[in-house]
Amino acid sequence: MPTIIYRNAQLLFDGSELSGTLHDLAIEYSAELVDTTVMGNDTRVRKGGLFTGKMSGKGYFDTVIAIEQIMFSNIGVDDTILSIFPDGVTEGSTTTGMGYAMKCTVDTFYVGGTDGALLQVNFSAMSRGIAAPGIIITP
């Protein structure tokens, strides 16, 4: 079974590469479960409903990469493209660089921390639109 050490993830947000300040990056893809239980059932019956997607990350405030400016200015902006490549990406490669992308709206942005620590930046974005989460990019 092949393994990947999670050390070279790439985050592309609306054309900007933001990986240099991140230390935590996650993708969540799920389906809402709809209750279809009727009289006579002795156990809850569920059916797959709408798909949802979420990407979130944590990093450090950096005035060079300016993740805080990019994320802050895009809060509530619809149909921004967010892509994550868990093991990096090389332009033109045909053997590496599988990734995930979605149209999204940034819903959370946070800057803060404790006195004496590196300044933290946290964000999350929710999927939006038709087939918004589910775009898989392969070499």
Image (cartoon, helix red, strand yellow):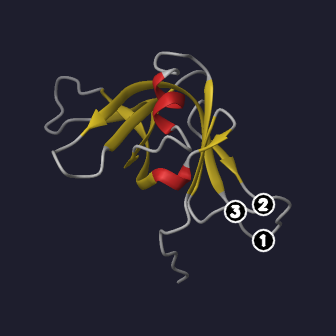
Judging depth in this view, the residue of 92 and 111 nearest the camera is 111
Residue 86: which numbered mark, if any?
A: none
Q: Position of residue 2 (x, y in %)?
A: 55, 81
Q: Is residue 54 left or right of residue 136?
A: left
Q: Is residue 130 above or below residue 93?
A: above
Distance in Å between CA atoms under marks 3 and 1: 7 Å
Q: Is residue 139 left or right of residue 88?
A: right
Residue 51: in sight, yes or no?
Answer: no
Residue 11: in sight, yes or no?
Answer: yes
Q: Decide: marks 3, 1 in contact (CB < 8 A)?
A: no
Residue 139: which numbered mark, if any?
A: 2
Quarter that holds the C terminus:
bottom right
Q: Position of residue 71 (x, y in %)?
A: 49, 29
Residue hosting label 3: 97
Amino acid type, residue under disc 1 in the picture: Thr
Judging depth in this view, the residue of 17 and 54 nearest the camera is 17
Residue hosting label 1: 95
Q: Position of residue 46 (x, y in %)?
A: 31, 35
Q: Decide: marks 3, 2 in contact (CB < 8 A)?
A: yes
- Quadrant of the rendered image containing residue 110: top left
Q: Residue at x 40, y 43 (%)?
A: 61
